[in-house]
Image (tube, rainbow, N blue to C red):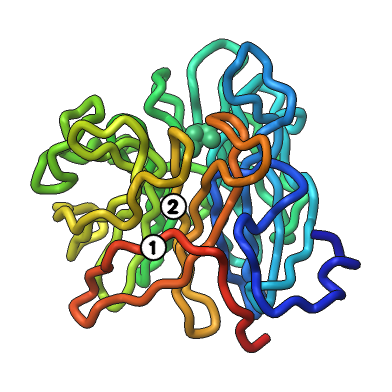
Amino acid sequence: MTNSVAAERKTFCENPIIKDIYTADPAPFVYGDTLYLYTTHDEDELVNDFYTMYDWRCFSTKDMVNWTDHGSIFSLDDIRWADDRAWAPQAVERNGKFYLYCPVHKKDGGMAIAVGVSDNPTGPFKDMGHPLVDEGDWNDIDPTVFIDDDGQAYLYFGNPELRYVLLNEDMISINEEVGVVKIPMTEESFAKGAHMTGTSYAEGPWFYKREGLYYMVYAAFGENKKVESLAYSTSKNATGPWVYGGVLMTEEGGTFTNHPGIADFKGHSYLFYHTAELPGGSLFHRSVCVAEFTYNKDGSITTIEKCNGVNIIDA
Ligand code: FUB
């Protein structure tokens, strides 16, 4: 996973993608001819037998097989008001600046969403000094950001409820008049399920648009299920109503959580997710994987098989 390893020129990327540290919550971001993959980082040594996560990592590839490790690009040490839980991030670019949205635990308690800003996709990112979203509850985790064709940027997030804010053009403030909007957690939108709202929606939303249809992919608890699968819903509008689409990946990752990240790159569509497949893998020692998939003609997605890895593509 270093430049020297990349120089070996492999033609197949075997899962997990990153083998020398534990990583989770993959967030792919395509910029130019490169796919950047932001991840969280599960420390080897656990504190209080819980998620022990202090920084965010970045890796990049031009061919889906040969990866460069950019190391730690943002950490809790860079956010003076946060003290724990460097959780699932997502990055986006606007007007030449790069924004990394990150859930963290605040020093004065509760989860909130931080924003790091950089001139470069590989950082270093600089915290804007205060939370972007801070409702004072557990729900403020797992941000997913998308800029629509009309320039409006949306930041969805949440566990157990899916909520969103409208981002202003500066990407570091929200439309205060609209505030935090709660998506109705209905069975029509997210199917009957075993999470706290009675639907399958749990956390880890991933929001994007393809051929005029909006997609919300997320970690889900199906009925009577005790570990997360991945599911998706679609909408004709950025703000819903959402219509349940189906299961994207079943619960076979060997760990309690899963977390989707979707990207189209050089003519291929990829689902990034995490499992406990590395040696020593566990609930708190996860590893990021990838599977290629295709959309059906009507935009639906057939359940994606967990796979061994992906082939090289034209660089
Ligand atoms: O990795 C920490 C948390 O676990 C993430 O924020 C959730 O999506 C779940 O993967």
Say which element carries label 2.
loop
Viewer-side residue, 35 vs 163: 35
Residue at label 2?
A: 260
Q: How many marks?
A: 2
Q: Is residue 285 above or below residue 58?
A: above
From the viewer's perspective, is 83 left or right of 292?
A: right
Q: Residue furthest bottom?
A: 314
* Image: 95 above or below 296: above
The residue at the point 63 percent across, 22 percent down is: 84
10 Å crowding of disc 1: few (<14), some (14-19), many (20+): few
What is the x, y in percent for residue 56?
68, 42
Q: Residue at x 73, y 30 (%)?
A: 44
Q: Is residue 33 above or below residue 130?
A: below
Q: Position of residue 225 (x, y in %)?
A: 26, 34
Of the 4 image quadrants, the one containing the C terminus is bottom right
Is 91 on the left-hand or right-hand side of 221?
right
Residue 220 occupies quadrant: top left
Q: Quadrant of the N terminus?
A: bottom right
| Disc 1 residue type (three-letter) | Glu
Looking at the image, can residue 132 be seen? no
Q: Are marks 2 and 1 in contact (CB under 8 Å)?
A: no
Percent of width and height locating residue 232: 27, 55
Residue type, mark 2 in image: Pro
Q: Label 1, secondary structure: give it.
A: loop
Residue drawn at x 46%, y 71% is 292
Q: Which residue is mark 1?
A: 305
Percent x, y of residue 201: 26, 39
Task: Give the mark nearer the N terminus: 2 vs 1.
Answer: 2
Question: 173 or 267, which is in the foreground?
Answer: 267
Alpha carbons under labels 2 and 1: distance apart: 14 Å
